[in-house]
Image (cartoon, coloured by chain):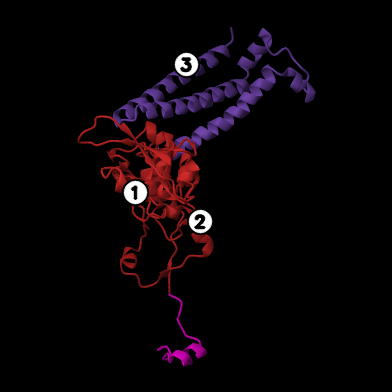
Amino acid sequence: MRESRLWALHLIAAAALLALGGLHMALMHYPALLGALGRPSEPVLAFAAVAARDRAALWRGLYVLLLGFALYHGLYGTRGILREVWPSPRAARAIDVGVVLVGLLVFVYGVTVIALAGMPW
Amino acid sequence: MVTVRVARFNPERDAVLRRQVWKVPLLPGMTVLDALFAIKEHQDGSLAFRCSCRMGVCGSCGMLINGRPRLACTTQVAELGPVVDLRALPNHDVIKDLVCDLGQTFEKHRTVRPYLIRPDVDEQERPTREYAQTPEEMLAYLQFSYCLKCSLCLAACPTEASTPQFLGPQALAQAYRYAADSRDGGFGVRADAVDSLQGAFGCHLAGACSEACPKGVDPALAIQLLKRALVFGPPHRAPAPVVPAQPRTPSAEAAARFKVPPPSV
């Protein structure tokens, strides 16, 4: 794939992280903000609330998106740094393959955790 | 008097750079190049430096002057203080003293095919008509066409320092200069060379190249525009077509004055 497409996706991931990270911060850490916006404050960190979110398809979808975008954004940046430190073509190939493998591994693990968390006890 | 310190290197004798100091009488309007000529003519004929036009046009006399890449011919000694510290451009191999090897710069420049690429090769080789271009279309690339190939931008670039394979600001700016030219149709071919981490996407936008450029080319801007073109497509979709040349019919007054025969139909 051309570098321009990877780079564009890197920027899209950054924008998505801002939106998803902002949503996370608003819901988890700034309930007062939501209260000010008209949404009554709820005990979001209570076990029942966490378990309810884990079972909701919308929340699980958002978790997967957040995981995917964060992984892509972080690993693309890491790849850029590593490729600059070891610029030889052979090292570049090894770094590209390594970054993709690490990304896939962590993504599959993360999705498995999200799926299992939503299972009934 | 001004003190001129030069980091010297003779490949036949030296393993590392050695510093040599001379005192030069400061004259009004004296440039660093003038000071180097004064040393070479009156104190040390073995000092090596490169120059040609002496007026900031050829880009031959680029060197590191008091820590900044600059052209020796356009840098006034009086602006630099009592000590002038000189060395060859960083990120380049040193041939001798202040003369660096620009071969890699020219090689990278060639990589981006710095010329008009068009489908009508015959017309290009044996032109019969004009490629029309409006002033606005010319302004899209004019700033970037002032490049001297002096290599000061490569000497200033931090990415070039860490990654020698990086094409560098000079070549990338020239890739955009031709991509933005309405007469060019070779964006796809040129994209093969620049759409990579060693190309436009290796640039971290430090902006040191634009600061160093003696002609105001602003390579950092060109690289950002090149990135945009690579993601969203070139500034123009198709090269400008050839058009018939403007008919050159002299006015009646001019025809009478210079006895120009009427145009044959």
Nearer the camera: disc 3 or disc 2: 2
Residue wearing tag 3: A109
- Could you give the CA–CA distance between mark 3 and mark 2, rounded to whole angstroms? 49 Å
In percent of width and height, residue A22 lies at: 65, 25
Q: Can you say whether B119 is above or below B254 in the image? A: above
Location of the C terminus of chain A by quadrant is: top right
The amino acid sitting under disc 3 is: Tyr
Tell me the SS state at disc 2: helix
Q: What subunit carries mark 3?
A: A
Q: Residue at x 50, y 87 (%)?
A: B251
For residue B37, the mark is: 1
Apparent side of residue A39 relative to residue B170 in the rendered image (left or right): right
- Could you give the CA–CA distance between mark 2 and mark 1, rounded to whole angstroms? 40 Å
Q: Residue at x 52, y 14 (%)?
A: A113
In percent of width and height, residue B8 lies at: 30, 36
Residue wearing tag 2: B140
- On whether disc 3 and disc 1 are found on a single subunit, the reply is no
Q: Can you say whether A83 is above or below A120 in the image? A: below
Please provide the residue range marked out in magenta: B245-265
The amino acid sitting under disc 2 is: Ala
- Chain B colour as displayed: red
User: Which chain is in purple here?
Assistant: A
Q: Can you say whether A96 is above or below B246 in the image? A: above
Nearer the camera: disc 2 or disc 1: 1
